[in-house]
């Protein structure tokens, strides 16, 4: 493993901590064609240029989310990747979680009938988990920070993976509490999908309780995922018919860290030509269009219809 990191201190610390063969300060110092895989974990405004460098070197890659911060150069890049059949995925980490995969499979198997509605709430005291947020990409909209591109895009990915293609979006957002940023800490988003289903997303990044709640409502029942507990209900009985916590008996921190290994292994599967359920660039591009349209919705005060 080799790394490219322009920050001298970070580069030296990382090289000492891990089994790094070479540490470069610039991608121009490397011969990308000599490698088997690149992982792009940089601010989102640099993604397109770095992905283009990988494409030029025919180097498979996984890029962190979101795909970019604008649509500039994305369509052309995707066309090149499609033409060359280069292996590329986007790091939406929630896809590797057991409970999310079970949730999706149960939806596809018709457990709740026809999926018609989704409510999602992902809110927490963000500074508690990222006390350095004011000095990171999160504080800057031009680098992909904020509740929509950095936070809601995770939920967009799950909805695109489970529900399908979004067609209309409306949104309100603002910076209500967090200081030292030029990005929103709160968003309220409504989405309509190609199949007619609708979704409502709520995010704030200042409340004290850590809330992660995804409720999928179908014609024959509901599936509710609260953090790692998945429950199924098919009546008005307050007790679910089925309920399982996929984190039971595990150390939460260790289990969370293990998901990054699972994601890495999934990416290696893709490089080896095996099935891989990580987000494709095409899905991430739909995600990006949805995020940008959500922002436009509020600035233009109207419902935005996404283009194909």
Image (cartoon, rainbow, N blue to C red):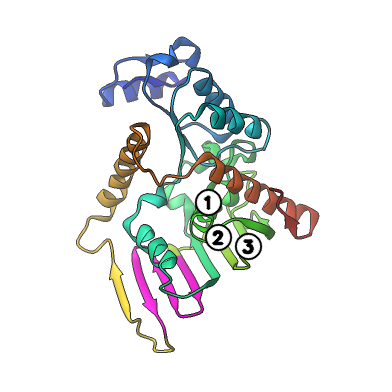
Mark sitting on residue 188 = 3
74 over 15 or under it: above or below? below
Above or below, 26 against 163 in this view is above
- For marks 3 and 1, the one nearer the N-term is 1
Q: Quadrant of residue 21?
A: top left
Place of residue 76 in the rendered image (x, y in percent of width and height, measured from the top left): 65, 30
Task: Kindly report the distance in space between the C-alpha atoms of the residues bearing marks 3 and 1.
Answer: 12 Å
Residue shown at the point (59%, 51%) measured from the top left = 148
- Of labels 1 and 2, earlier in sequence is 1
Marks 2 and 3 sit apart, C-alpha to C-alpha, by: 7 Å
Towards the viewer: 107 or 27? 107
What kind of element bears circle 1? helix
* Image quarter (top left, top right, bottom left or bottom right) of the N terminus: top left
Q: Which mark is residue 203?
A: 2
The 10 Å Cα crowd at callout 2, few under 14, some 14 to 19, many 20 or more, is many
**Residue holding disc 1:** 151
Neighbourhood count class around disc 3 (C-alpha, 10 Å): few under 14, some 14–19, many 20 upward: some
Q: Which residues are magenta?
A: 213-234
* Tag 2 near tag 3, CB within 8 Å: no
Residue 196 percent across, percent down from the top left: 63, 67
Q: Position of residue 182 (x, y in %)?
A: 65, 44
Tell me what residue is drawn at x 67 percent, y 47 percent: 292
Q: Residue at x 53, y 69 (%)?
A: 119
> Is residue 228 shown in magenta?
yes
Task: Tell me which secondary structure the magenta stretch mostly adopts.
Answer: strand
Answer yes or no: do the residues labelled 1 and 2 have beta carbons within 8 Å? yes
């Amino acid at each position: 493993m080799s790394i490219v990191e322009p920050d001298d201190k970070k580069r030296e610390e990382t090289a000492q901590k891990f089994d790094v063969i070479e540490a470069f300060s610039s991608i121009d110092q490397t011969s990308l064609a000599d490698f088997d895989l690149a992982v792009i974990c940089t601010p989102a405004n640099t993604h397109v240029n770095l992905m283009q460098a990988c494409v030029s070197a025919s180097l498979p890659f996984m890029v962190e989310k979101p795909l970019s911060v604008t649509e500039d150069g994305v369509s052309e890049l995707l066309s090149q990747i499609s033409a060359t059949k280069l292996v590329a995925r986007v790091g939406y980490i929630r896809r590797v979680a057991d409970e999310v995969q079970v949730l999706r499979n149960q939806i596809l198997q018709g457990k709740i009938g026809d999926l018609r509605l989704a409510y999602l709430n992902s809110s927490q005291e963000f500074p508690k988990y990222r006390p350095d947020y004011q000095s990171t990409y999160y504080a800057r909209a031009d680098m992909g920070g904020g509740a929509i591109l950095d936070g809601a895009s995770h939920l967009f990915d799950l909805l695109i993976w489970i529900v399908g293609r979004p067609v209309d979006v409306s949104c309100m957002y603002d910076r209500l509490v967090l200081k030292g940023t030029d990005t929103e800490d709160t968003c309220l988003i409504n989405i309509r999908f190609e199949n007619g289903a609708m979704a409502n997303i709520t995010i704030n990044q200042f409340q004290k309780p850590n809330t992660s709640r995804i409720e999928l409502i179908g014609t024959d029942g509901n599936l509710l995922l609260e953090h790692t507990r998945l429950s199924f209900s098919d009546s008005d009985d307050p007790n679910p018919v089925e309920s399982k916590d996929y984190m039971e008996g595990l150390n939460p921190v260790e289990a969370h860290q293990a998901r990054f290994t699972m994601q890495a292994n999934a990416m290696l599967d893709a490089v080896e030509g095996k099935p891989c359920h990580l987000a494709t660039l095409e899905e991430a591009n739909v995600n990006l269009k949805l995020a940008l349209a959500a922002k436009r919705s509020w600035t233009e005060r109207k419902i935005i219809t996404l283009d194909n």
